[in-house]
Image (cartoon, coloured by chain):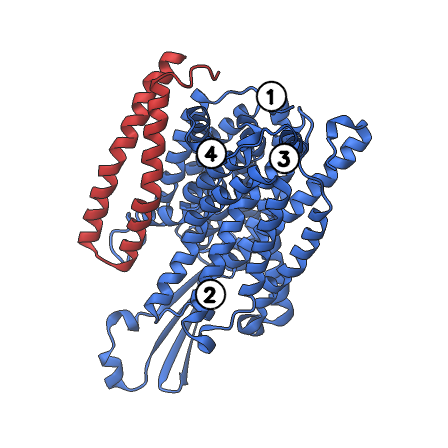
Chain colours: A red, B blue
Amino acid sequence: MSAIKKIFGIVWTLMGVGIVPLVIMQAMKEITAKPTEENWIFWSIVIVVLMPIIAFSLITFGIFALKGEYDTIA
Amino acid sequence: MAQNVRDVAPAEEVTSTRRVIAASSVGTLIEWYDFYIFGSLAKIISEQFFPKDNPTAALLATLATFAAGFVIRPFGALFFGRLGDLIGRKYTFLVTLVIMGGSTFAIGLVPGYKTIGFFAPAIVFILRLLQGLALGGEYGGAATYVAEHSPAGKRGFWTSFIQTTATFGLFLSLGVILIVRQTLGVETFSDWGWRIPFILSAFLVAVSVFIRMRMSESPLFVKMKKEGKTSANPLAESFKEKDNLKMVLIALLGATAGQGVVWYTGQFYALSFLQNACNIEFVQSNLIISIALLIGTPFFIVFGSLSDKIGRKYIMMAGMLIAVIAYRPIYTVMYNEANLKNKVEVVEKKVVTVKNTVKGADSLITTVTTKAFTDGTSFKETVKAKFPVDPALKAALSKDKLKPETKKEVTLPQNLYYKMIGLVLIQVIFVTMVYGPIAAFLVEIFPTRIRYTSMSLPYHIGNGVFGGLVPLISTRLVEATRPAPNLPPADPLAGLWYPILIAGVSFVIGSLYISNKTNNLDTE
């Protein structure tokens, strides 16, 4: 079980890292194509609020999992 | 002096705990009521305070909706959580109640945009932020307070009463609005009657404050304070110390994020889907949700209680997994049952009426088409086209300004109406599975000295950010499948991918890393 927890730790970390460029690229693509106020508000909320929370929590959680911090919780 | 429920006789213990639960639940219910009143009356508030022709006011309207729900709630959790760990649970959640009630009451008194101009949206925006701040501090306090009074082995059962308050708060807000609207009439309600539900809050809060003032402080907090073990800096201890931070992360990613999206999908997205994708008539769609909520709410207590016996994790994870698997099939049935393309029209019953009225310089043409179908479904389409009588002025207007306003209303027959209630009820059951045990789960994974702070933040990020964004992101996902602005979306169920993804990830993390052991509170 500990090994699985650690392997998944890599997955969470990569997900956390990967989400940043993905979201920013998508936002730039959509805002450039249609620079409406609605688009700006939507992507601002995603980039300022949602993305940092997901990225920070997944990366930190993934690193903890990789280091075996959750091995004692069964 | 605080009385420890574990030191008293069993009968007295039950009475004392019941009083604690009643006092806490009523206050939390009123806070949810206050919070939802704003959302439920969003359209009227927007007309009164945030006129669309003023871009700054319109922007404030959007921010009032999102900022209060997403950004401010976690800040409230941090601010009041810290206070609750420093000075005590009782006084902190008394303060949140007063702030919430005061802000709600004040919104009911703010003069409209027509009277005081830009000050109106600015004041309402600030009051809405205060509401979000107070809500951020309330839930953690109430859950912690009840859990710290509850006997071990019954914590899931007792805290589940707190879990029912969010649903009852929504229910109460809808009920009060409906009663006031029916009593005063739609016109008077839109004019000034909408203020009554806000003003009524002052009375509700006064009663709740009176009840809460008479309650004693949490016995575990009193004990800890007496022993000098309270935290000097709960924020730093919660989020800078690795042992606590790792539990905050597991609570967020493995529980509250998934719970938040399941909660919002079952209670809010379902209503939005019925009204916008299925075009179900306003009263019927609200009744479908209300009845499903009413039948489903006792299950918060069923699953909270069950979690005392079989563990919190299994129930929460089962709720998430079933939701992930069942959402698309459930919504497919909902969509198909209301889809007129799947029905046979009774052509001879089709009625079209056209009415032309001239008001001032404008002409309004209203076309109403009603249709009946063999299964008993009825359909009404109202198209309103407004344009200047003067042809020169009409020619000068853009296509967008001349676009008619279309309203479609589908009214289902009795059998399909019950079927819809059943389908929404299944989703409410998912909500009760993930939400019923979560207060007990959260209080048990954090130590008493920082419990209020540590549990409040993941809860409000999970609910406020992950859950609160369901309507925004889901609508966006559906819109992305629309081939052209005037064509319907290719996949009306695309909005479900967001809650499915978040609940799916949460399920995997929760299943792998969360323990199913029911812990004792550390100072017991």
Amino acid at the residue labelled 2: Ile
Q: Is any atom of residue B319 visible in this view?
A: yes
CA–CA distance in space, label 3 to label 1: 16 Å
Labels 2 and 3 within one chain: yes
Q: Chain of mark 2?
A: B
* Quadrant of the snapshot with the N terminus of chain B: top right
Residue B14, percent across and down? Answer: 77, 33
Q: Chain of mark 3?
A: B
Are the two marked residues, 2 and 1, in contact with CB atoms closer than 8 angstroms? no
Q: Tell me which residue sits at (36%, 22%) in the image.
A: A64
Labels 3 and 4 within one chain: yes
Q: Chain of mark 4?
A: B
Which residue is under mark 4?
B323
Label 2 or label 3, whichever comes before in sequence order:
2
* Quadrant of the snapshot with the C terminus of chain B: top right
B11, above or below B19, in the image = above
Are the two marked residues, 3 and 4, in contact with CB atoms closer than 8 angstroms? no
Which residue is under mark 3?
B159
CA–CA distance in space, label 2 to label 3: 36 Å
Which residue is under mark 1?
B310
Pick the residue in front: B271 or B451: B451
